[in-house]
Image (cartoon, coloured by chain):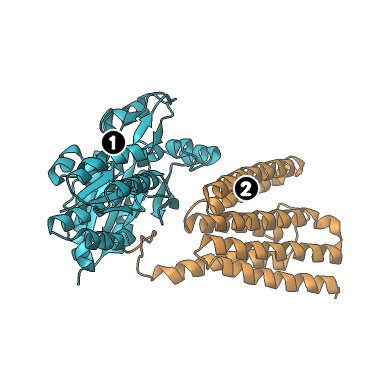
Chain colours: A cyan, B orange
Amino acid sequence: MFQIISDSGCDFTKEEIQEYGIDIVPFYVTFDEETHLKEGVDISKQDYFKRLVEEKTLFPKTAQPSPQDYVDVYTPHLKAGKDIISLTISSKVSGTYNSATLAATMLQEEYPDRTILVIDSLNGSVGQGLILREIIKMRDKGYAIRDAAAIAEQVVKTTKIYFTVDTLEYLKRGGRVGPTTALVGGILGLRPVLHLVNGSVEQLESVRGTKRVMQLIEEGVVGALAGETQHINLSLGHIFREEDVATLKSNIEAALGMTIVNPIAEVGVTIGTHAGPGALVVAYCKKYETFVQ
Amino acid sequence: MNTWYIIAQVLGVITICFEFTSYQIKDKTRYFLITGIGSFFWMTMFVAMGLATGMSTQVSLIVAGTYSAIRNLVFWRIFSKNTPQSKEAGLNFLLVMIVVALVAGALAIVNAPPQVRWLHTLGLITALSFVIGQYLPGVHYVRITVVFYALVVILTQSPLNILYGDFRWNIMGILIELAKIASVAVFYVRYSKDPKTPHLQFAKP
């Protein structure tokens, strides 16, 4: 049985990490560029976003785990004779994939009999989480590491993630929208719908009002998944929008006649720093079984 | 009949074709391209009219046509790029266009005879609404605002403009605006029977 490792971009809870026996390499966040805190270790998501809301002048930054961080997590498993699948957040939004790959290359010389496969999720948050869930299922079913990784690469291609934000402020801070767009968009109450295309964040549409954007996301998901729900895994996430995400979940379930089994996730710092409190995320992918003949 | 006058009418017919077509298009980028070309022919129609009847009566319309053509074609380039930078540039451009329209509209109101100032004020309001409507997302804002704008333009160019002592009886100018209104009506009739598809198409897994 191989070991599964992911960066903290997957937005798993501590309980899930324990339950599934996976290891997490955390991202760093800094508020002052001097103290670097590990996500989920030194600072919880709740505390991080609470500070972001309370201190309007705060401009936190996130940093990828270093190759050494990966070496530190990989090594004990290699020593124990385990192979590793390492899933990372999209290489288009972070250098984590490079850190993980570099660490794998370094350790491969030291442990030539072991296999370390690094997979770029081309996704983030609950999208990355979905791919991770499929890899976990394959591990538990006893799949060989190379077979599991090959199927996971297929799952990556089917994973789609869409998200909206409650304010353009944080997209402005992250340079994803300009100051004029943020100002006028704020006055007009514009709510963008963003998605990842080949791993990069792009804006799909922008509409007026929270109610309208929620409706559009629901229609978009239902339109894309109608008739295919048996082969689909779906996850939702949010930052401080418990009520909205619960409504969206039940509406999607009712419209598609399916039960969303994955728990609603709290979006972490990587997507959250750019999207900000009030973000709402939905992702879906094909189940790994779809690719098994 | 003056050759330039005939050329102006031909250019007017070409404008009608482009303007009518533009309001049948749901895709914003293509809409701006087609209406931009339409605005260009609209402007050249006034140039031809100026050559036929004297430039002094057409200068303001040529300026308005040039303003429309540039605005639409710049919006076309901006919308087709669809990057955060292009969107920011588009919004800044929109704000400049609004300021230009406000200044030009204010001057027109101040210089107009008191009894027709309401008409110029209406023109300014509907023109601004239309420009903002063009920028706003979706297919409806631009179509709703263009109807009001077109109605005001018709009012200024037809005998309906009874308050103007020297109203302009410009048949082609009226037909172009009527074509826009008709196109909007046709658009809603065409798509009213379509099954309601989601506004946003999310990718299949």
x and y, in percent, of residue A214 in the image: 32, 49
Note whether residue B189 is visible.
Answer: yes
**How would you rate the neighbour count of disc 1 (Cα within 10 Å): few for under 14, some for 14-19, many for 20 or more?**
some
Observer-nearest of B127 and B166: B127
Which residue: 27% across, 45% down? Answer: A6
Observer-nearest of B123 and B21: B21
Q: Which residue is mark 2?
A: B122
x and y, in percent, of residue B1 in the image: 85, 76
Which residue: 50% across, 70% down? Answer: B186
Q: Which residue is mark 1?
A: A240
**Distance from label 1 to label 2 (Cα)?**
45 Å
Whether B152 is drawn above or below A244: the answer is: below
- What kind of element bears circle 2? helix
Quarter of the picture holding the C terminus of chain A = bottom left
* Amino acid beneath label 1: Phe
Q: Quadrant of residue A144?
A: bottom left
x and y, in percent, of residue A216 in the image: 35, 54
